[in-house]
Amino acid sequence: MGTERDTVTFVCTGNTCRSPMAEALVRAALTRRGDALGHLRVASFGLAAGEGAPASDHSVRAMSRIGLDLAPHRSRPLSQADLDRSAVVFVMTGHHLDVLRSRFKDLPGHLLRLRDVLPDGVSREIPDPFGGGVRDYEDCRDSMVEAVPALIDFLRSHFAR
């Protein structure tokens, strides 16, 4: 194949709410750390995404409240080429896992729900806030924020150079 698997990929349905928020959170966390994970790229895609849609207004607002800017984001549909560059793929729900497994033939060795890195006994799903109010988007964001330290530890244990 020849393609280096150097990307941490986040996948949701439309790539306008959850996966762009996750991408921004993890990119910011990796930038702050500046350690042995500096070679990793971060990207997000959607399973049913159109090309070029902006992040939802509520997603932009929820992220701006913690100092991250989603305004430049544009949606992208997930392709096999994107998966071929992915070291790990994090999805938002078990349904996303099922769709990935049925739609794509070659998946990276690490395919997880974003919250699978958390200890047992907590919800693994990140429900779609689409159509809800700003508070729904903030709850969605916070469920990701809660998982980011464990997610960075997972990346460090598997991909540090």
Image (tube, rainbow, N blue to C red):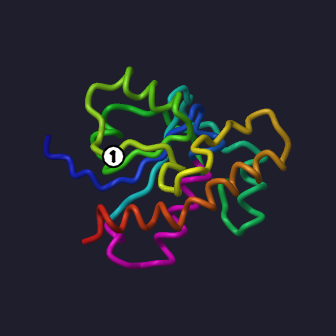
The residue lying at 35 percent from left, 70 percent from top is 37
Which residue in the structure is indicated by mark 1? 110
The residue lying at 84 percent from left, 49 percent from top is 135
Residue 149, percent from left and from top? 53, 67
Along the horizontal axis of the image, is 41 left or right of 150?
A: left
Magenta stretch, main secondary structure, is helix
Tell me if residue 27 comes above or below residue 105 in the rendering: below
Report the span colored magenta.
20-39
The residue lying at 24 percent from left, 72 percent from top is 161
Image quadrant where residue 36 sits: bottom left
Between 111 and 61, the residue placed more toward the observer is 111
Between 59 and 146, the residue placed more toward the observer is 146
- 37 in magenta: yes
The residue lying at 29 percent from left, 63 percent from top is 159
Tell me if residue 67 comes above or below residue 136 in the rendering: below
Along the horizontal axis of the image, is 127 left or right of 8?
A: right
- 144 in magenta: no
Along the horizontal axis of the image, is 65 left or right of 10?
A: right
Residue 157, percent from left and from top? 32, 66
